[in-house]
Amino acid sequence: MSGPTTINGPVNDGGTDEGLIRTTLFRNLAALFDKLESTSSSKAMIAALARFLPTLSPEEVQMTAYLLAGRIGPSFSAPEIGIGQIFAVRAVAEASKQTIEHVKKLVVKLGDVGSAAEALISPRASRLTIARVFGELSAIAYAKGSGAQQTKVQRLAALLGQASGPEAKYIIRAAQGTHRIGVGELTFLYALARAFAGKGDSKAALDKAYNVLSDLGEVAYRAARYGLKSLKRVKPVPGIPVRMMLATRVEDLDEVSLHIPGEMFVEYKYDGERVQFHRNARGEVHAFSRRLEDITHQYPEVTTALHAALGATTAIVEGEVVAIDQRTGKLQPFQQLMRRKRKHDIARYQYEIPVALFLFDLLFLNGKSLLAKPLIERKELLQRHIQAGRIVRIGRHPHS
């Protein structure tokens, strides 16, 4: 099983050996992006993607999934490419040998830096490959330290200097994360199903794998490399957030039975932040937000307390972090907790705004996925493997 966000294999100069990245020209992908941008029909988008994706290597399928999102990996582990408007304009000016003012005027006229790049970059027979473009954008994203922004601009300008106009448009848009293509996650999953299975029910396996891995590029890679059957064996991995199931509002309680037939739980709703905590085999505890962001730094006292309270070598638990009045012990409103959303002065706000974690679900325990088990069983296991205390608590429900 390959690791998420891993792009394996050297660029292949023409061979088709299994596992090697093919040298598909980036202009082919740019042409696909043009086609996708020019239609608002999701059916047409799915059909175009389904025809194109099987012509790529599994690694290129993965790269395409990321580039469509304007990223070089999943949000929970890969940085954004990080090119702002000013720096994108500078890169286009350098690559096209135009003044910055001239590029700015064209951006105003055409609507975005990508379109300006397409108009200014000289026509050329580009030999850029998908892998080369992706590799350069990755290097730009990971550039750090003193002078990092200048390094990003220089590398982007050098890449644009090898591109054709249409390629430059989508390179810039990917670097800025401002694609106008309109291919959402569901559209891409439908295209994967059609491209690598051809059956309508195959999307269910893709949906499940995506919910568990939270990484569209990794799901795309596995579908292209190993087939849809491999996705049915996907299980959670501590350190990789599982997409959280969100609530749906109803106007009347009678509507609930229409959506959830049979027996159901009614639980207390805590006015806090939903957080998923992971404990890996090294004993490290990480916290992820509902948007799959790593927020471990926000709640150091919670991760420490959970490390002590959790009787398991590996686990994934979900709960609600709630602000607590340190004098009365009463729960505080969400607005109070949001003052903890910071990267600095953590110790100060840890003291000023103490919190408690109310756990309500257990998704993974000691190397085994619990996702297929009934909720009542997961809650019973949670009770058995958590030593509740002042900070880590078990959320209340009718069966507790």
Image (spheres, helix red, strand yellow):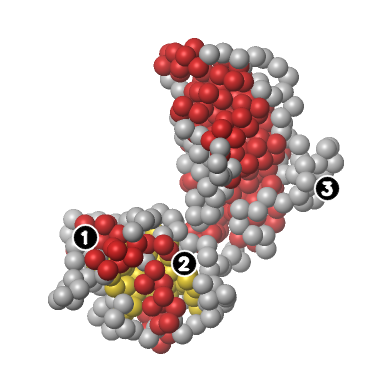
Q: Label 2 is placed on what type of residue?
A: His
Whether residue 316 is visible, yes or no, is yes
In 3D space, how far apart are the residues under numbered discs 2 and 3 (Cα atoms)? 39 Å
Q: Which residue is mark 2?
A: 286
The answer to which of 139 and 221 lies nearer the viewer is 139
Which is more N-terminal, label 1 or label 2?
2
Q: Position of residue 67 (x, y in %)?
A: 57, 39
Q: Is residue 233 left or right of residue 106?
A: right
For mark 3, give the secondary structure: loop
Q: Position of residue 204 (x, y in %)?
A: 52, 57
Q: Is residue 318 left or right of residue 160?
A: left
For mark 2, give the secondary structure: strand
Q: Label 3 is placed on what type of residue?
A: Asp
Q: Which residue is mark 1?
A: 336
Q: Residue at x 55, y 44 (%)?
A: 145
Q: Is residue 6 left or right of residue 153?
A: right
Q: Which residue is mark 3?
A: 17
In 3D space, how far apart are the residues under numbered discs 1 and 3 (Cα atoms)? 57 Å
Kindly check if marks 2 and 1 are in contact, taking CB atoms under 8 A apart as contact. no
Q: Label 1 is placed on what type of residue?
A: Gln
Numbered disc total: 3
The answer to which of 224 and 301 lies nearer the viewer is 301
